[in-house]
Image (cartoon, rainbow, N blue to C red):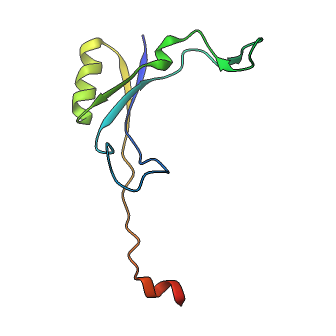
Amino acid sequence: MPTARIFQRPKNAMQSGRYRTDRWQLEFEPAEAKKPDPLTGWAGSGDTRDQVRLGFPTSQAAIDYCEKQGWTYTVIPAPEKTLKLQSYADNFR
């Protein structure tokens, strides 16, 4: 039985806006460890569920989908957003 992780997508380091950070994502826990390929040296495994990522508008929609499929799941709460308010003049103190 697969185990799924449900989490809210974090903002990319190269991203200044909040595009698609309100979406929730479902990924599967890895079933086996990755090992280096002898020919190329790339890390890989025979687990194809690692390639599956499903997007949902809310966490409840992702939970409902997991329960409908009979999968166990873990919900990782979204981190609290904190704003660091400062003015331009604070750079010169």
**Could you tell me which residue is drawn at 23 percent across and 35 percent down?**
57
The answer to whether 76 appears left or right of 65 in the picture is: right
The correct choice, above or below, for 56 with respect to 9 in the image is above
Q: Quadrant of residue 87?
A: bottom left
**Could you tell me which residue is drawn at 37 percent across and 20 percent down?**
72
Instruction: Point out residue 9 in the picture as x, y percentages from the top left corner.
Output: 38, 41
Quadrant (top left, top right, bottom left, bottom right) of the N terminus: top left
The correct choice, above or below, for 27 with respect to 10 in the image is above
The correct choice, above or below, for 3 with respect to 59 in the image is above
Instruction: Point out residue 11 in the picture as x, y percentages from the top left corner.
Output: 41, 48
Farthest residue in the right direction? Answer: 38
**Could you tell me which residue is drawn at 50 percent across and 19 percent down?**
50
Instruction: Point out residue 31 in the picture as x, y percentages from the top left corner.
Output: 54, 15
Total numbered labels placed on residues in the image = 0
Nearer to us in this view, 48 or 6: 48
Farthest residue in the bottom direction? Answer: 93
Q: Quadrant of residue 54?
A: top left
Nearer to us in this view, 38 or 63: 38
